[in-house]
Image (spheres, grey):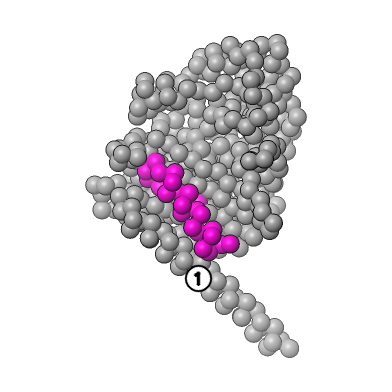
């Protein structure tokens, strides 16, 4: 009997290894084909299935370098930062620092002064699910002012002027992607914790998970990729400033898989917070939104995902809690089409 149990366990282990090896080989083949069709673009991908990690990468840190991209190469995670910010908001809710149904004026720092008709209307979760109706930054104008560092001119005065001069919420309760909403969420976190966003994200996520290659203010490291715009011209990484909670974290495939592993596992504050962010806070016929997460469902599966684009890089995070897998995609060019094609191919040909 004991020998039968040992043989069964051995068979399960061998089957799991073979399954994982097959997935990693298929993903590598798809990524390689995409790279061969776009040899000027660097790609780094991490995949996790049942707590097993797989990585593949192609291309060099930059066009002039002979150093190959790997799982430790640094990219801009761009708007995937919003997932980190929403996780921090959920953690603050569990710590009773924030009430989930509270209005934003209860937590905003000094300088904001919502007009009377807008008070007791916008909830924290309206910001996280992009339905606050508040005006946003004008990126067209910001890019025209400084094509390499467009957010450098955004200050506290910029934000308070936009918000305090708003006298109506034209599309409140409807989805409209908002950068300023996530900047404000970062400021709310700073207000309730009495610390900088940089300190909070390190204390609540980066340090507990030992994500030592996830960078905030300082990112002048040797294994940093170079970003390129759609025309193939060099695009600088965005420097850290007040807009950080919306998209200025830098990381690599290895660290982001560590984050995904924490999300998919149970009994840790990050996973507990993630489950709250996965609740539906907005829905219409075309979209379901959690706290920063797009939610896609079919008859058998529910996927949580978030894309990101800077002016020089593209990224994607996606996971399926029930099937216990997750994937991170980094590309060192602003190339949303390539990023989405990669994800679609991997899902349709391998994971479905």
Q: Which residue is at a point 44% across and 44% down the rendered structure image?
A: 336
- Asked whether the viewer can see residue 111, the reply is no
* Secondary structure mostly taken by the magenta-highlighted segment of the chain: helix
Q: In the figure, 43 relative to 20: above or below?
A: above
| Residue 225: % across, % down | 35, 45
Task: State the quadrant of the N terminus.
Answer: bottom right
Q: Secondary structure at mark 1?
A: helix
Q: In the figure, 76 relative to 347: above or below?
A: above
Q: Position of 58 compared to 248: left or right?
A: left
Q: Position of 136 compared to 68: left or right?
A: right
Q: Which residue is at a point 50% across and 23% down the rendered structure image?
A: 137
Task: State the quadrant of the C terminus.
Answer: bottom right
- Indicate yes or no whether the magenta region holds residue 118: no
- Asked whether the viewer can see residue 247, the reply is yes
| Residue 68: % across, % down | 32, 55
Which region is colored magenta? 328-352
Q: Which residue is mark 1?
A: 22
**Given the current orientation, which residue lies at the most extreme front position?**
285
Q: Which residue is at a point 31% across and 39% down the rendered structure image?
A: 231
| Residue 224: % across, % down | 36, 44
Q: Nearer the viewer, residue 337 or 46?
A: 337
Q: Position of 128 compared to 350: left or right?
A: right
């Amino acid at each position: 009997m004991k020998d039968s149990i040992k043989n069964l366990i051995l068979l399960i282990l061998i089957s799991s290894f073979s399954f994982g090896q097959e997935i990693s080989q298929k993903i590598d083949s798809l990524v390689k084909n995409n790279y061969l069709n776009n040899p000027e673009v660097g790609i780094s991908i991490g995949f996790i299935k049942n707590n097993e990690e797989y990585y593949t990468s192609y291309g060099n840190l930059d066009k002039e370098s002979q150093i190959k991209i790997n799982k430790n190469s640094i990219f801009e995670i761009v708007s995937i930062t919003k997932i980190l910010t929403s996780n921090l908001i959920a953690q603050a809710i569990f710590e009773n620092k924030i009430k989930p149904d509270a209005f934003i004026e209860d937590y905003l720092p000094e300088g904001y002064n919502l007009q009377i008709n807008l008070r007791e209307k916008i909830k924290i979760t309206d910001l996280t699910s992009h339905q606050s109706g508040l005006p946003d930054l004008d990126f067209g104008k910001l890019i025209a002012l400084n094509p390499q560092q467009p957010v450098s001119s955004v200050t506290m005065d910029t934000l308070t002027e936009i918000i305090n001069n708003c006298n109506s919420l034209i599309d409140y309760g409807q989805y409209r992607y908002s950068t300023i909403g996530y900047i404000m969420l970062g400021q709310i976190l700073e207000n309730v914790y009495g610390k900088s966003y940089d300190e909070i994200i390190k204390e609540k996520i980066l340090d507990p998970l030992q994500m030592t290659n996830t960078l905030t203010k300082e990112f002048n490291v040797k294994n940093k990729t170079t970003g390129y715009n759609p025309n193939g011209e060099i695009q600088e990484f965005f420097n850290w400033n007040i807009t950080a909670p919306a998209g200025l974290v830098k990381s690599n495939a290895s660290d982001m898989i560590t984050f995904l592993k924490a999300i998919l596992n149970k009994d840790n504050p990050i996973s507990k917070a993630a489950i709250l962010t996965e609740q539906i806070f907005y829905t219409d016929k075309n979209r379901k939104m959690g706290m920063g997460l797009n939610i896609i469902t079919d008859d058998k599966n529910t996927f949580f995902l978030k894309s990101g684009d800077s002016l020089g890089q593209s990224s994607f995070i996606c996971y399926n809690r029930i099937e216990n897998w997750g994937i991170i995609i980094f590309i060192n060019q602003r190339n949303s089409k390539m990023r989405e094609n990669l994800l679609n191919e991997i899902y349709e040909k391998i994971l479905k």
